[in-house]
Image (cartoon, grey):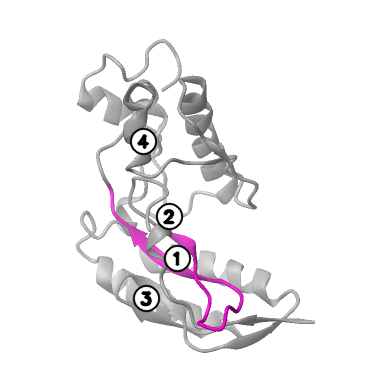
Amino acid sequence: MTTTLRRSRRNPALVLLFPVTTLLLTACSGGDDGGPVAPVASVKRSTTPTPEVDDASGASANPADVEARRPQLRVDTTDAEEGRLYTVWGDCLRAKGAEMGWKDGGDGIRWSFPSPEERKKWPQAFEDCATKEPILPAATDPERNPDYDNDFRAYVKCINRDSAIIKVKQISDGWTYADDYDVPDGAWADFEKVDRACEIEGFGGE
């Protein structure tokens, strides 16, 4: 049995689930023939940070204190740890009244977070939980990493070097598949491992 991966187009509706800068795989629409969806590695730009769930939350803290208390992610932070931190933030938001969608994914993140527009409905919840919002790696933020373009090119080059079946190409806001692929069972998991290792190699694990 094989899975066909088709050229993908970006889906604007999925551009920002987290109001932070990150490099990750996001679902994109499939080909015009309605084929399976395919992911695009996409850069998500940061917006204003948000706030912790204990009594010493971000509600009355100054911005510098809030920022100092937020958990800092690295490029080499494990999926399990990143999932745990986002779930803690989501648990806080839900406890403070924000509407959180249930997310049953493989990345360990329990909640589907509101979009930047939707989060305006619950400003107090996001303020109260601000110190729990993870800070994404500076290396994957084009506004904080002066070598971002070179690092991203190295990341894509690494994928094409180490991936046996699936090849990718760089586009303006990430990468997409270089072609349509019939992928044998098990090969997708291998590609995800390559993608993760190459992200760390390309961006230096910072």
Question: Mark 2 or mark 4, which is nearer the start of the sequence?
Answer: 2
Between disc 4 and disc 2, the foreground one is 4
Question: Mark 3 or mark 2, which is nearer the start of the sequence?
Answer: 2
Direction from residue 125 to residue 79 in the image, left or right? right
Between disc 3 and disc 4, the foreground one is 4
Between disc 1 and disc 4, the foreground one is 4
Disc 1 and disc 3: Cα gap in Å?
Answer: 9 Å
Question: Mark 4 or mark 1, which is nearer the start of the sequence?
Answer: 4
Disc 2 and disc 3: Cα gap in Å?
Answer: 14 Å
Circles 3 and 4: CB atoms closer than 8 Å: no
Look at the image and tell me whether residue 105 can be seen.
yes
Image quadrant occupied by the N terminus: bottom right
Residue, disc 3: 154
Circles 4 and 2: CB atoms closer than 8 Å: no
Tell me the number on the disc at residue 36.
Answer: none
Direction from residue 190 to residue 83 in the image, left or right? left
Q: Which amino acid does label 2 sit on?
A: Val
Please report the residue visible at 43 percent of the width from the left and 40 percent of the height from the top.
114
Tell me the number on the disc at residue 119.
Answer: 4
Q: Which amino acid does label 3 sit on?
A: Ala
Q: Does the magenta stretch include residue 25?
A: yes
Tell me the number on the disc at residue 75.
Answer: 2
Question: Mark 4 or mark 3, which is nearer the start of the sequence?
Answer: 4
Please report the residue visible at 39 percent of the width from the left and 69 percent of the height from the top.
202
Residue, disc 1: 199
Circles 2 and 1: CB atoms closer than 8 Å: yes
Closer to us: 33 or 150:
33
Residue range of the region highlighted in magenta in the rendering: 23-46
